[in-house]
Image (cartoon, rainbow, N blue to C red):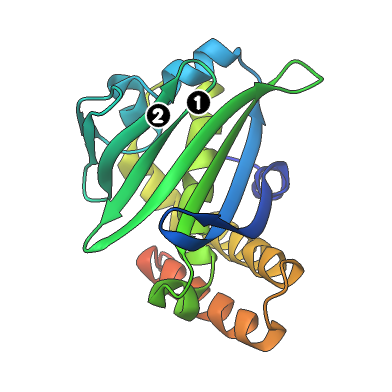
Amino acid sequence: MIDVTQQVNAVRRQLGTRVVEAGEVHVMTISQAYDATIEDVWDACTDPERITRWFLPVSGELRLGGRYQLEGNAGGTIERCDPPKGFAATWEYGEGISWIEVSLSTDPDGRTRFQLEHLATVGDDQWDEFGPGAVGIGWDMGFMGLYLYMCSTHPGDPQEANAWLASDDGQRFLTLCSEQWYEANVAAGADQAKARSAADRVTVAYTTAFPEEETSG
């Protein structure tokens, strides 16, 4: 399905902090360059029919001020929209709220870089327990889905994707992504022992969510 090492290494991951109206927030930045025009990538991540092919089914009004809902996941309000350069929205899941900011730009080689910043309030219990990988690995899965979609004319198949995540390659992908977020966490100044424990917990959480398939002997 995919070269695991190539995909993991194609993604840039960085962590930092910022002060916004809501207070101090963690800023998780993830980006990847795609061999497509900026208009095509913009359309792929803003058109409801195309979003469903590589991410999740989405409903609502995808316009400035509109509400959106990803099936079985987060919803929110679109707070900024500047096509085809980017948009910003709230990311509301359960009783929690965080924020996402998407920006598109052209790399020197002509490819389109899709960058997403996810802002989470400092002191968030999930971050303390599982580290940045709790959200980061999910975005890694989305970035992989977009890569596969942009490289193919065929719609994505969620069942096929879940089956792949349960395979040896899929489990290695989840584990390597977790390790990359651990390294980004330490590089950002996190206590190494705490970061290690959080990364181990989030690796178990994701690989258990997509357990390895049993093989007959």
Image position, residue 41 (x, y; %) = 52, 20
Image position, residue 134 (x, y; %) = 46, 65
Residue drawn at the location 71% of the way across and 67% of the way down: 188
Against 159, residue 108 (above or below) is above
- Residue type indicated by callout 2: Arg
Residue drawn at the location 53% of the way across and 64% of the way down: 133
Pick whichever, 112 or 160, lies toward us.
112
Residue drawn at the location 45% of the way across and 50% of the way down: 164
Contact between marks 1 and 2 (CB within 8 A): the answer is yes
Distance, label 1 to label 2, CA atoms, is 8 Å
The residue beneath circle 2 is 80
Q: How dense is the environment of label 1, judged by Cα within 10 Å: few (below 14), some, or many (20 and up)?
A: some
Q: Judging from the image, what secondary structure is the residue with disc 2 in?
A: strand
Pick whichever, 136 or 63, lies toward us.
63
Question: In terms of sequence position, does the residue under pointer 1 or pointer 2 come before the other?
Answer: 2
Image position, residue 122 (x, y; %) = 48, 69
Against 143, residue 109 (above or below) is above
The residue most toward the front is: 21
- Residue type indicated by callout 1: Gly
- Can residue 197 be seen from the camera position used here? yes
Residue drawn at the location 33% of the way across and 41% of the way down: 158
